[in-house]
Image (cartoon, helix red, strand yellow):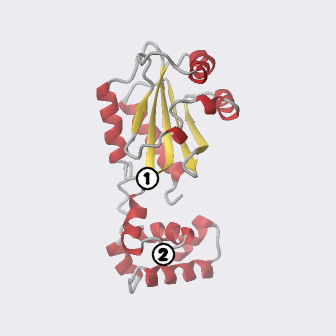
Amino acid sequence: MLLDTADFGDRLLSLVTAALPLDGCCFYRVENGCHAVNHRLSELSPYWLEKYRSYFWQFDPLHPARMTCASIRVQALDRSAGPVSPGEREYLAGFLAPQRTLHQAELYFRQGAEIVAGASLLRNADQGGFSAENIRLLEALVDFSGFGTAEKRVQALAGSTLSPREREIAVLLGRALSNKEIARHFGIALPTVKTHVSRILEKTGTQSRAEFIRRFPDDGAGLG
């Protein structure tokens, strides 16, 4: 994961709760395109998170593993769609209903085609379902969130030649962080950072840190 997803998640939750009436929401990271981990909760119970992680995730119709279409950025449960599967009925009756959160929408953040993070938004009966206008607003939020843009700037030139650790360091390099700051961020030795930075400059065809920052700036636009 190249971005600081904890910081990204906190800012995202602040934005969506300010933009829409919600009963609760959470942000999570997605590993290997299908495993939701590192949930960050806003007005949701840790008890129900544990219930979800231990059992109900497998019945969640909006789980990232089910979103095989790469164009899907936001999806909401359609309560008027007709018959549902036994698993979905169990999810609705055993998970959503006890929390009095009858309406759910999911946001999917991708790097390339792969979902790497997501957010669950829940509403109660009084707040109602997510309207078409709500969905358009959430799609715009995903589109303009800036998630993954720092990586794309680097990969635009370097392609897949940078190692995962080099891509992580390249993002911070684009933010004009010093070697000491990068070493502190990742908890690694300063000489190791210097070696990585040298390789990054070589692989991206840049002669100096200043040139790299000009060509691959991380402008910090992601979620403000």
The x and y percentages for residue 192 are 61, 79
Tags 2 and 1 touching, CB below 8 Å:
no
Q: Secondary structure at mark 1?
A: loop
Task: Write down the residue under mark 1.
Answer: 113
Using the numbered discs, state the Cα–Cα distance from disc 2 to disc 1 in whole angstroms. 19 Å
Using the rendered view, name the quadrant where residue 183 is placed.
bottom right
The x and y percentages for residue 175 are 42, 67
Q: Is residue 212 among what the camera can see?
A: yes
User: Which amino acid is tagged 1?
Assistant: Ala
Q: Nearer the viewer, residue 59 or 44?
A: 59
Q: Is residue 83 left or right of residue 45?
A: left
Marker disc for residue 184:
none
**Mark 1 Cα within 10 Å, few/some/many (few <14, many 20+)?**
few
Residue 197 against residue 20 in the figure, above or below: below
Q: Nearer the viewer, residue 146 or 97?
A: 97
User: Which amino acid is tagged 2?
Assistant: Thr
Q: Is residue 14 left or right of residue 219?
A: right
Q: Nearer the viewer, residue 176 or 79?
A: 79
Q: Is residue 176 among what the camera can see?
A: no
Task: Write down the residue under mark 2.
Answer: 161
- Tally the marks: 2
Upstream in sequence: badge 2 or badge 1: 1
Residue 108 against residue 169 in the figure, above or below: above
Q: Is residue 142 left or right of residue 182?
A: left
